[in-house]
Image: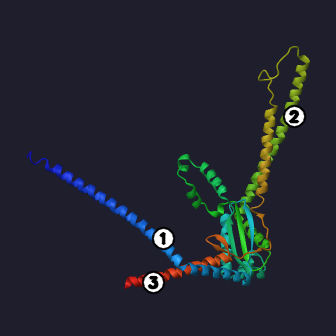
Amino acid sequence: MNNELPKPQQSEEVDLGQLFRLIGNAFDRFFRFIGSIFKGIFLAFVWLVFFIKKHILKLVIAGVVGIALGILLDKTSEPVYKSYATIKQNYPTGENLYSSISYYKDLVKQKDVNTLQKTLNIQKSEAETILDFEVAPVISENEKLQKFDEYIKTLDSAVASKVEYETYIKNVENYTYEYQQIAIKAKARNSFKKVFDNIIENIDKNEFFEREQEKDLTELKNEETALMQALNQSDSLQSTYKRVLEKVLEKDKGAQTSITIEGSTQIDKTKEFDLYKSDLELRQKLVDNRRKQADKQFVVEVVSSKQESGIADKSKMVFGKSISIKKYYAIGLVLLTFIILLALESIKYLEKYNK
């Protein structure tokens, strides 16, 4: 019995050795796999460099032809005019605004001139020239950071620590920003201001926002009345206090027989500054109230609307960025040539592999 006891220990040592060898082999295969990936990337890069070197002349010729084509089309194609208007949303009208612009875009794509004419209240000839509508927020990265900071301050500290800026930006819709820019493209120099005014008027006439505006203005008017009454009472209180103070001073002046230090007791301290400070606070609230009333006078208001007749726009949009028509065709032809040459090389390689 005693001679048979060590055998299980020897078995455990053998199993541990096999386990370590398996782990070592797994790591070895993993690192070789990673190395093969980097090696493949490097070989692909080297192949690409030699491929471009081999066909550089063809790619340059494609770029030159693209520039020449862009210049030709720039001179011969019909001009496109574009105009912008920046608006400020005093109410959360963004979703309505974006839906309206999307609706107008669809009407243009469907060439439904009659509906577009009636919706925007413009002439049929003007509606026929419109090519596109666009809308985008007007906000800088610094302003986005400020909005994020304001949002974080509204959250619990435990929740705020888990919210990242990138996640916040992805979940914020563009229409929520206060300032928006509307753009219109047309084939002729129309009166773009009339179209912008009608777009804004359609939002202003929304019954929901009209009711919200009426409630806000009524509340602000009531607040203004209360502030005016408080100011009148404050003025009356100050006048009364001054009269009482003057009488006390006259009485003390006539009966004073000894030297005293002014303000040496709590009773002697004047409350005039407190009254004056309260009066200033009430006046500041009144100023803020009237500013809010001025802001609420319009549901949406135009901040800037220049270029009423539009400016010539011959640029192309690529991945949300505007580039000139020459660069557009030059880059397009170079990429097209590169893809064709790459496809031909791939076919040659497959033919060799097949043999």
**Residue 199 image position (x, y, % from top left):** 74, 70
Q: Nearer the viewer, residue 331 or 116?
A: 331
Tell me if I can see residue 59 in this picture: yes
Q: Secondary structure at mark 3?
A: helix
Q: Secondary structure at mark 1?
A: helix
Tell which residue pokes out farthest to the top in this image.
257
Kindly identify the residue that appears in the image at 83 percent across and 17 percent down: 260
For mark 1, what is the residue?
A: 45
Q: Is residue 179 above or below residue 317?
A: above
Q: Is residue 209 above or below residue 83?
A: above
Q: Earlier in the sequence, mark 1 or mark 2?
A: 1
Q: Nearer the viewer, residue 107 or 354?
A: 354
Q: Nearer the viewer, residue 8 or 63?
A: 63
Tell me if I can see residue 221 in this picture: no
Q: CA distance from mark 1 to mark 3?
A: 19 Å
**Splitting the image into 4 quarters, where does residue 312 fall?**
bottom right
For mark 3, what is the residue?
A: 347
Name the disc covering residue 239, or none: 2
Residue type, mark 3 in image: Ile
